[in-house]
Amino acid sequence: MIRTSAPPLHAVFGALADPTRLAIVERLLREGERSAGDIAEPFAMSKPAISKHLRVLEDAGLIERRIDRQWRVCRIRPEAIRELEAWMARYRKFWDISFERLDKIFAERRKQENRDA
Amino acid sequence: MPDTAAAAADRDEADCTLVIERVFNASPAEVFAAWTDPTVLTRWWGPEGHSTPECAMDVRPGGAWRTKMIGPNGDHIVSGVYREIVPPSRLVLTWGWQQDDGSRGHETEVALTFQPVAGGTRMRLVQSLFLSKEQRDRHNWGWTSSFNDLERMLA
């Protein structure tokens, strides 16, 4: 069924709805693990501002942070992306099954018209 | 992959959305009615093993729609508003599931086009992850490419 597990996925969408955070997620998907400093670099934004964005992404379960020697590094949580993928797959199934039924409705209609003709 | 504007636009168009195309043995008007006439919609709407006993639609721009499906695991309510209504060729609506706590879940947009072709009508469904075209245009969220990236990263 398509019912989405409300808080996690909702938080994920909320987190991704911001262009800066989306850009961060895309970059981490492309490049793998990155330090907070690396992530902040392309943005004309203070470190605390970027830090806040990273916290939102972390709270939504999209990224995880760890300390590597003295560095804080971030990476994507694959589970979160897989959940989004599964969400899309559920929709596809919903439509495919519905449209098969609609197909049958039209097929019966055509058959009825042929009988009436 | 170079992150050029063109590549980003491609991804946005191709991947940010769920696209389903299907040809029905019916006229565009009939397929359009299948979406806008509750007596037809309730006969095909919903996943396997579900029936749709309740369906309310106020088919005009800004008008609300709501369906209630009943299945083995209980009721499922989905609702939204109509954004564009151009019979018999185009219909755009918003879509949100009611959550367990009664609130409305993440909203997506469903855009349908109905085009006459040999043998009937080609229906194209585009369901967008983000709500408005405007919102989407600000994003270059690429589904397929993201998944590919992820697979590569995990390899």
Image: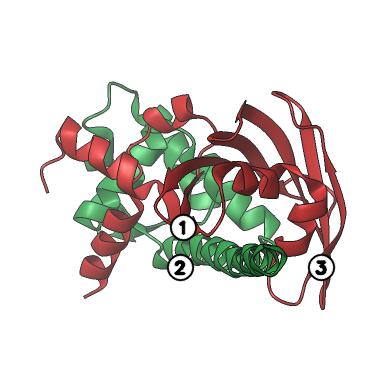
Chain colours: A green, B red
Residue at image location 46% in from the left, 58% down from the top: B22
Which quadrant of the view contains residue A107?
A: bottom right
Residue at image location 75% in from the left, 32% down from the top: B59
The mark closer to the camera, 3 or 2, is 3
Comes first in the chain, label 1 or label 3: 1
Number of numbered discs on residues: 3
Q: Residue furthest front?
A: A117
Which quadrant of the view contains residue B90?
A: top right
Identify whether B81 is placed above or below B123: above
Q: Amino acid at mark 1?
A: Val
Residue at image location 78% in from the left, 33% down from the top: B64
Mark 1 neighbour density, 10 Å: few (under 14) some (14–19) many (20 or more): some
Q: Amino acid at mark 3?
A: Ser
Q: Amino acid at mark 2?
A: Glu
The chain carrying label 1 is: B
Which quadrant of the view contains residue B46?
A: bottom right
**Image coordinates for residue B140, horizontal then vertical, percent:** 32, 38
**Image coordinates for residue A96, horizontal then vertical, percent:** 55, 66
Q: For the residue labelled by badge 1, is the local secondary structure a helix, a strand or a loop?
A: strand
Identify whether B144 is placed above or below B63: below
Asked if badges 3 and 2 are on one and the same chain, I answer: no
Asked if badges 2 and 1 are on one and the same chain, I answer: no
Residue where numbered disc 3 is placed: B51
Q: Residue furthest right?
A: B53
Disc 3/disc 2 C-alpha distance (Å): 32 Å
Residue where numbered disc 1 is placed: B23
Asked if badges 1 and 3 are on one and the same chain, I answer: yes
Q: Which mark is residue A79?
A: 2
